[in-house]
Amino acid sequence: MTPIKTITIATRNSPLALWQAEYTADLIEKTFPDIKTVLLPMTTRGDQILNVTLDKIGGKGLFLKELEQAMLAGKADIAVHSMKDVPADMPKHFTICSIFKRHDASDAFVSNKYDNLDHLPQNSVVGTSSLRRQSQLLALRPDLKVLPLRGNVQTRLKKLDNGGYDAIILATAGLERMKLDNRIKSKLTPNAWLPAVGQGAVGVECLSSNQQIIELMQQLNDETSAKCVTAERAMNKVLNGSCSVAIGAYAELIDGIISMQACVNAPDGSTFIRKQAQAKNPVELGSTIAHLLLDDGAQAILDMADEAND
């Protein structure tokens, strides 16, 4: 088999996506000095359509489709993603071949006027297009007005600075990777507030038939992060979760045992089901928590979300 000399990395063209791709390129070249990397920046449909929420136009998979087509066409060897943007049910022909060490998975409270969620006055306007964030906001503060907020990190911050919102909720990892952590007023931590499935983790996708790339990239895999993200994604897959439903999850690996919390919420925050469990096997743990949620009534919430999007 001919040794790999160059790896072409398909990536979205946003600043954060480019950071992730450059991070991956640097890691590859430092680990495998004989291999060079080339970036293939692309604009996806998810990046182009910013005037409606993702659940109305096809979900998070819109951030992947063009990158996957580039791999199918032989223009790229791998694609780099935020794992929270990767659908639970992978498209045919593709696999996640590596997950790097996970960053902070929390969400961040960002405001120019207030230090935290509790300090927001009644009827304050908070920006987010995530139903998961919206549902947790309204469960804690039903008086708030939640308005849509799309675009890259810099675009969302500009909309806040222009006075359209009293506060916005963003992923801590994205802000810190963009060296914008000075904008974080407080963190919404997993114990009280659950992040998106896979949030804070960067993953590498490739063709499932490309065994040479798979074997190479698995050498960069962080086992602890991969097990935790796998557990969260296994839960999401059983629930058939997408961005049209409000699902949160967070797993930790301690002394060989994975502990995970997960929730399914009504978008308006009126119903909130949360479960936790422990196991050694990530897929079994994900399935266990999914069924605990379903046994406690999660299907009714999931069906309600599906009906709202029909």
Image (cartoon, helix red, strand yellow):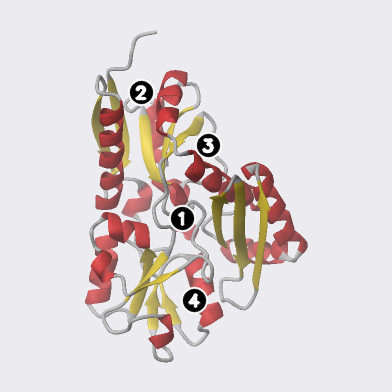
Structural distance between the alpha carbons of marks 2 and 1: 27 Å
| Foreground residue among 41 and 194 | 194
Foreground: 130 or 303? Answer: 130
Q: What amino acid is found at the position of numbered circle 4 in the picture?
A: Leu
Looking at the figure, which quarter contains the N terminus? Answer: top left
Residue 240 circle label: none
Residue named by callout 1 = 57
- Name the image quarter holding residue 50: bottom left
Q: Which residue is tagged 2?
A: 74
Q: Does residue 304 appear left or right of residue 197 in this picture?
A: right
- According to the picture, the residue beneath numbered tag 3 turns out to be 91
- Residue 169 visible in the shown view: yes
Q: Residue at x 75, y 65 (%)?
A: 296
Report the Cα–Cα distance between label 1 and label 3.
Answer: 18 Å
Identify the element where label 1 is drawn. Answer: loop
Hey, what amino acid is under mark 1?
A: Ile
Task: Tell me if residue 62 comes above or below residue 160 in the rendering.
Answer: above
Q: Which residue sits furthest right? A: 295
Q: Residue at x 31, y 40 (%)?
A: 11
The answer to whether marks 4 and 1 mark residues whose Cβ atoms lie closer than 8 Å is: no
State the residue lying farthest toward the top. 1
- Give, as a three-letter code, the residue at label 2: Gly
Q: Is residue 300 left or right of residue 4?
A: right
User: Which percent across, then down, holds residue 4?
Assistant: 32, 17
Across and down, in percent, residue 294 comes to 73, 59
Q: Is mark 1 in CB contact (under 8 Å) with mark 3?
A: no
Give me the C-alpha separation between circle 2 and circle 3: 17 Å
